[in-house]
Image (cartoon, helix red, strand yellow):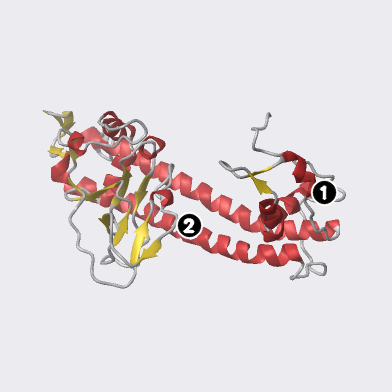
Amino acid sequence: MFLGQRLYHFRTNPQKLDADFLLYSLLHDDLQGQIRSYGSGATVEHMRLEDIPCLMISLPAIEEQRKIAAILSAYDDLIENNLRRIKIREEMAQNLYSEWFVKFRFPGHEQVRFVDSTLGRIPEGWEAKAMREAIAIRPSISVPKCEQVPFVSMGSLSETSMLISEIEYRTQASGARFQNGDTLFARITPCLENGKTGFVQLLPSKDTVACGSTEFIVLRSITLCPEYVYLLARSDPFRDIAIKSMSGATGRQRVREECFDQVLLPQPSDEILLSFQMIVRPKFEMIHSLSRKNATLRRTRDLLLPKLISGEVDVSELDIAIPEEAHV
């Protein structure tokens, strides 16, 4: 591998310094403070390469280093495992959406007659419906008077999943307004092309109204279901329509919402829609549950890290199994 010009490579002597212990030490306030003290540069603050060997690290005995690293790594391993479970469930939901509502291979489709429509051939009993009849775009929502209004920034949206990472609280309501069950769709470049799309299910109640970036397009189901709307917004054909409509100055192009006026969607029968929702809703709920668990794991790890690295918490007498690769 070749390193970018703003990266520095450390390779440890495993008999003196555990590689994972070094990683967590670099995240600790002590080394972070040292790094900031060496910062220079008017445009982009950085640390000069020749100053990096001047950094000082506090080293307990190698066995203690490995124990500390094992404790903190255990949290990171749990977080990573939950992220994999989240990814699998989201992929399952997206594949199910594609099978049922794009390829029309829903349970029992072999016995269903297909008929002509403006969308092409669709199952009998389904309807080719205008998107604006099936999905509310920027639904009108009034914000109740309260001291603190939940706010979601563009930075809180993921590029690869439905997760919304964090909520701020502000004293004034401004920007896009939404509630649980709504989909947040980024309308500005490069956020749209990068995939920023979120599904709202982290608000405390169904009546809670939150605000967010003015660059969100809020999508809400009218005749479909919330999960269908989110998975549609994640689909490549839908995103291509939005991307091709973008206009404005270079680097600040935005979706022209008129592009949705001509979009037709397959409106399934109530029976099929309910069956779909019964399968995917538990997956959405599990994704939210795993995300909350990860938030708790991160908070706990971040509380432990400075106490362990500084030696405030003594691990010398703890009986901790060290992975074999830690000794390599």
Image point 52% across, 58% down: which residue? Answer: 294
Image point 40% across, 60% down: which residue? Answer: 167
Coordinates of residue 61 in the picture (x, y in percent): 86, 59
Coordinates of residue 39 in the picture (x, y in percent): 66, 48
In the displayed structure image, the side of residue 231 where residue 20 appears, left or right: right
Residue 7 lies in what quarter of the image?
top right
Q: Amino acid at mark 2?
A: Leu
* Element at label 1: helix
Q: Are marks 1 and 2 in contact (CB under 8 Å)?
A: no
Image height check: is 157 above or below 111? below
Assign the C terminus to one quadrant of the image. Answer: top right
Report the residue marked by disc 1: 327
Label 1 crowding class (10 Å Cα cut-off): few <14, some 14-19, many 20+?
A: few
In the displayed structure image, the side of residue 223 where residue 148 appears, left or right: right
Residue 49 lies in what quarter of the image?
top right
Which mark, by number, is residue 284?
none
* Element at label 2: helix
Report the residue marked by disc 2: 290
Image height check: is 57 above or below 263? below
| Residue at the front extreme, as displayed | 42
User: In the rendered image, is residue 127 in sight?
Assistant: no
Label 2 crowding class (10 Å Cα cut-off): few <14, some 14-19, many 20+?
A: some
Comparing 287 with 187, the one in front is 187
